[in-house]
Image (cartoon, rainbow, N blue to C red):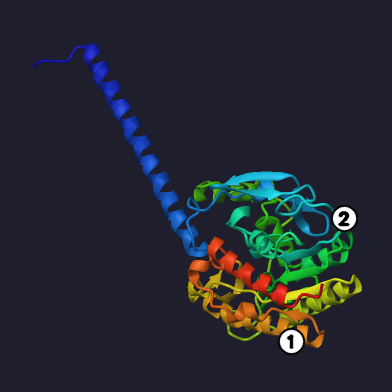
Amino acid sequence: METQDPATKRLSRTRQRLFGAFLSAALIAASLIGIEVAAQIAYRYWHGNWLFAEPPQHHSQLMRRHPYLVGALKPNVDIKLGKGTVHHNALGFRGPEVLLKKPNGVTRIVLLGGSSTYGTRVTDEEAWFTFLQQDLGTSYEVINLGVPGYSSLEHLIQTAFWLSDLSPDIAIYYVGWNDVRNVHVKGLQADYSDFHGPSQFENLGLLLSENRGKMVSVYLLRKALFSRLFPEPEGQYTIEGTSDKLTTKMDSRALALYERNMDNIVAICRKLAIRPVLVPQLLNYDRLTADKPYYWIPYIKERDLKRAMTAYNDALRNLSQENRAEFVEQVLQEQFRSDDFADEGHFNALGGKKFAGILAAYLRQHSIN
């Protein structure tokens, strides 16, 4: 019987060990890939899109902490987004540079709203605030004060403390979406401090654990480690739904707080001799059809968001009539389709141009200059 010499045996064992190591590494890699695939699928189910396909999350580069508003835009920011740019000017507003003092002979317009006013998912060149400036021409100056996630409560603070320096002639409020998220929150605080406020730390990328990257498994592992080893008290909150959660019933408490905020906003504008123009919120209802909550709004099913948003728009219309403020009904009369939106509620360039055109036509028709 022929036997292998020691050198051949050692070589054979080495090959076996290498093959075993390779096989183990391959199994580990396959397991990690499987975990990531499952995590991506789960993320898409809850958020409606793939994390790896999302545009780069720039919030951590765009936002800074603010002592009263949780977060505000960083000034002097330039980020490439596709073929365009996202620019914050020296005053910390989205868009081109402007002077704090209003130029002579110009009608100054400020825009207030959340991410759909700020221009999430589009470049400056594709955003509706840019199209509005182009439509109105050089006799107008459009300044965008929109900030992702801001609700009527943050707009109330902006109106009370920012607009006196800017001295605008007109303040346009495109609002509602971020207030609807408070519907059916049990024990909703009058200052939104139990849910909306602390949730903004996460939404605006102000928590170290919220650096998402492209891999869901890494993102979740980072969140788990931070929650256990480096807990961040900011942004920690626990909410509970009322007995009417996930029903079609309207939440009178949440709606009343929204009406209160908008009523105060109109009153402050009048005190500052600013013309308030209220614009109803549009959403892409063709994409909001599921029998589950939309991740941004925990206690309303997607398919019921149109009902809720209509109630808030109706409240805004009624408030404008009671206060003899302006309400741009034409926005609701125009037919916006799914291809006007980049997602569930943010305009793409096509929708932004259409939306800006409606506002420009309204302002020209109702000019008081």
* Residue 20 in the figure: left or right of residue 80: left
Q: Position of residue 156 (x, y in %)?
A: 81, 69
Residue density around tag 2, few if under 14, some if 14–19, many if 20 or more, within 10 Å: few
Q: Position of residue 37 (x, y in %)?
A: 42, 52
Q: Position of residue 200 (x, y in %)?
A: 70, 60
Q: Position of residue 228 (x, y in %)?
A: 65, 49
Q: Nearer the viewer, residue 328 or 185?
A: 328
Q: Separation of disc 2 and disc 1 at Cα?
A: 34 Å
248 relative to 129, above or below: below
> Do the CB atoms of the residues marked 2 and 1 lie less than 8 Å apart?
no
Tag of residue 91: none
State the residue lying farthest toward the right: 271
Q: Which residue is mark 1?
A: 318
Q: Nearer the viewer, residue 182 or 117?
A: 117
Residue 346 in view of the camera: no
* Residue 126 in the figure: left or right of residue 187: left
At mark 2, the secondary structure is loop
- What residue sits 43% from the left and 55% below the top? 38
Q: Mark 2 or mark 1, which is nearer to you?
A: 2
Q: Nearer the viewer, residue 302 or 339?
A: 339
